[in-house]
């Protein structure tokens, strides 16, 4: 069974600025590659260790202005050459609603 077959949540391509902060790791000016309501893939060179808990901020932009930030508690679950994947552990309700809307809107773009 591949990773895609195990996924229960639709993952969509979604590039947005992000920042990550953990106990021994902090990085800004990152980008997401894709996202679901349960996790995301973050593109970067330096990666936190597997199992690391972190706070992920997604900076939703309009032109060059941040119009909204989504803040999520996450765990690093996979590392790749071009970045790492996180699984969301805690999402405030308002941020979950925004995240669900992002996934739904981008899912229809892929169809």
Image (spheres, rainbow, N blue to C red):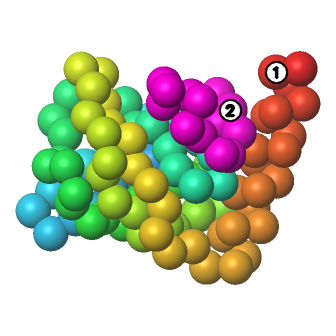
Looking at the image, residue 39 sits to the left or right of residue 65; the answer is left
Quarter of the picture containing the C terminus is top right
Under circle 1, the secondary element is helix
What is the magenta range? 1-16
Looking at the image, residue 89 sits to the left or right of residue 51; the answer is right
Is 13 within the magenta? yes
Is 2 within the magenta? yes
Label 2 to label 1, Cα distance in Å?
8 Å
Q: Of callouts 2 and 1, which one flags the residue occurring earlier in the amino acid sequence? A: 2
Question: Which mark, residue 12?
Answer: 2
> CB under 8 Å between callouts 2 and 1?
yes
Residue identifier under label 1: 110
Work out whether 8 lies above or below 84: below
| CA neighbours of label 1 inside 10 A, class few (<14), some (14 to 19), many (20+) | few
What secondary structure is the magenta-colored segment mainly?
loop
Work out whether 2 lies above or below 34: above
Classify residue 35 by image quadrant.
Answer: top right
Q: What residue is rendered at 76% in x and 47% in y?
A: 102
Looking at the image, residue 29 sits to the left or right of residue 91; the answer is left
Q: Position of residue 87 (x, y in %)?
A: 44, 55
Q: Position of residue 65 (x, y in %)?
A: 62, 49
Q: Position of residue 85 (x, y in %)?
A: 38, 41
Q: What residue is rendered at 14% in x and 49% in y?
A: 49
Question: Which mark, residue 89?
Answer: none
């Amino acid at each position: 069974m591949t990773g895609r077959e195990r996924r229960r949540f639709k993952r969509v391509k979604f590039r947005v600025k992000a920042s990550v902060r953990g106990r021994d790791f902090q990085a800004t000016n990152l980008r997401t590659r894709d996202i679901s309501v349960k996790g995301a893939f973050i593109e970067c060179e330096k990666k936190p260790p597997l199992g690391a808990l972190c706070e992920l901020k997604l900076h939703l932009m309009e032109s060059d202005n941040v119009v909204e930030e989504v803040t999520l508690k996450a765990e690093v679950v996979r590392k790749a050459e071009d970045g790492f994947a996180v699984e969301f552990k805690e999402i405030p309700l308002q941020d979950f609603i925004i995240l669900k809307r992002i996934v739904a809107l981008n899912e229809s773009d892929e169809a």
